[in-house]
Image: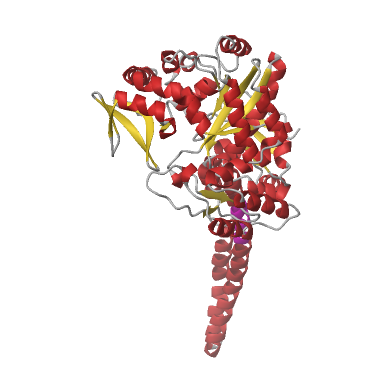
Amino acid sequence: MNVERVALPLANRLAREYQQQNESALSFFAHNPYRDQAYRERLEWLSTQTFNRLQLAEGLHNFNQAIGNHPEALDKIELLKQQDTYVVIGGQQAGVLTGPLYTINKAVHLIQAAKKLSAELQVNVVPVFWIAGEDHDIDEIDHVYWTTDGDTRLHKERLSLKKRGRASASKLPLEEEVCMQFLETFFQEQTETAETKNVRELLTQTAKSSSTVVEWFARLLAQLFGKHGLILVESSLPFVRELERPVFQQVIEKNEQMAQLLVQASERLATAGYPLQLEVDEHQANLFIYEGEDRLLLSRHLDRFVNRRQSYSRDELLALVQEQPERFSANVVTRGLMQEQLFPTLAFIGGPGEIAYWAYYREVFALFGMQMPIVLPRMSITLVEGAHLRLLEGLELSVEQVLTGFTEWKADWEKKQGPHPLHEQFAQVRQSIEQLYRPLVDEVIRLDPGMRGLSEKNSTLLLEQVSFLEERLIRSLQQKEDVAYNRIKRIETTLLPEGGLQERKLCFFPFANKYGLELIDRMVEAPFTHDGTHQLFFV
């Protein structure tokens, strides 16, 4: 089997206890994600709801066809027209070269979960990846990290994107020349393999076909996962805005109640002892509005909704929603409501941070006549190469030790790298030579004072020969220590980069360059478990 599970507790306490099915953590959610009956109860509730399935399917089909998604994904979209089709959904920012590995892991989980739930529930369940293309924190998405064989450094390369004010990523142009230079730098750092040509063609062709970094991200995911039926949707698409219009309207109408519920949820979380993931207050409107190309956050003061440029009355905002829904955009709180409005969502797959956010939302969903979907913790995966295993074997370490206690192990190893083991013996030999040889030298000088210089030099040479042998031993040991140190650094860089999980830092495509783009297919077919434990995938 090419998959192993590792007991790796999550740093986020709420997410950890939720995964452990602690009652306190579960109380902030509508369902226990590890209880089979929860999925049947959620299906029963969804069967009472209505969705604009035809308009949704048409919009999804047009977008997925435009980005070159696979016919298998288009067929899954057609299934959404049927009343007995549901979705598992998750999303991510549109990072350069798909961003950190957790984006890939999330897509794999969506596909596997949809297949598993379809079989267990005897209904159609399709995977949907929601691209958060409206993020304007470009510094979070414009770079990529990787390591190279035999190197102890973590490489970082940034794609130069022309940022303009508070413009969303979906509106930033992807300049072909700059992009090609970025890719050239990337491939210069990669070892040429039999797979390099295919990876280069994929990255180059998708980039040349894309007008924005978000479109490039979408095209890459379509090429990697489309054959497995992954449906893609992007948050700023016009048809998405049209379908979201009723929720925008309700958010404006019930803004005060929603803000109060969030404050109350924050207080309950604090009382339960959980760290607060969101900063909430009664003046937050939990909506963005576009002023030109800038996406600006709204806040509410008395009866006005304001951003840094404009002020609106409630009626003015409601009129704008009807006339120009494309000007509105959800924030981290209201995005889940939009998702619920568009899709018959059986389960939402999220990482630890997302789980901590969603703990605020249960009563907000209820305020809008909705039910929070099942929130399923995302699979966490480390890719382990044969080279990693050989390095670990030389240090008598396991992958689990690296992921759970590497800092302590490394500190202990460094303490042991003190004076060489024969240091005291060499010192004793030098002292013995002095004690044994000095009387002889003194006697020679007494008998023939003219031999003083020769005798003293002879004594020094003997001591120097001992020191020479010690220096050669030290040099030899240092070389061995350097090899060990480099091994440790390589392990650290590839399995625990900058002290965090590999999936939060490294990019997928250097792995594809070694093992082929088919690595995606192998991951999709791998026997991963969906219980929230960390898993090792041996490539």
Residue 146 on image: x %, y %: 58, 50
Residue 25 on image: x %, y %: 47, 18
Residue 438 visible, this angle = yes
Residue 106 on image: x %, y %: 60, 33
Q: Residue at x 31, y 27 (%)?
A: 316
Residue 412 visible, this angle = no
Specify how the rendered protein is coloured.
secondary structure
Seen from this angle, which residue lies furthest front?
323
Q: Quadrant of residue 359?
A: top left
- Image quarter hosting the N terminus: top right
Q: Residue at x 68, y 23 (%)?
A: 79
- Depth order, front residue of 192/373: 373
Residue 521 on image: x %, y %: 73, 37
- Depth order, front residue of 7/440: 7
Which span is picked out in magenta? 477-487
- Depth order, front residue of 464/62: 62
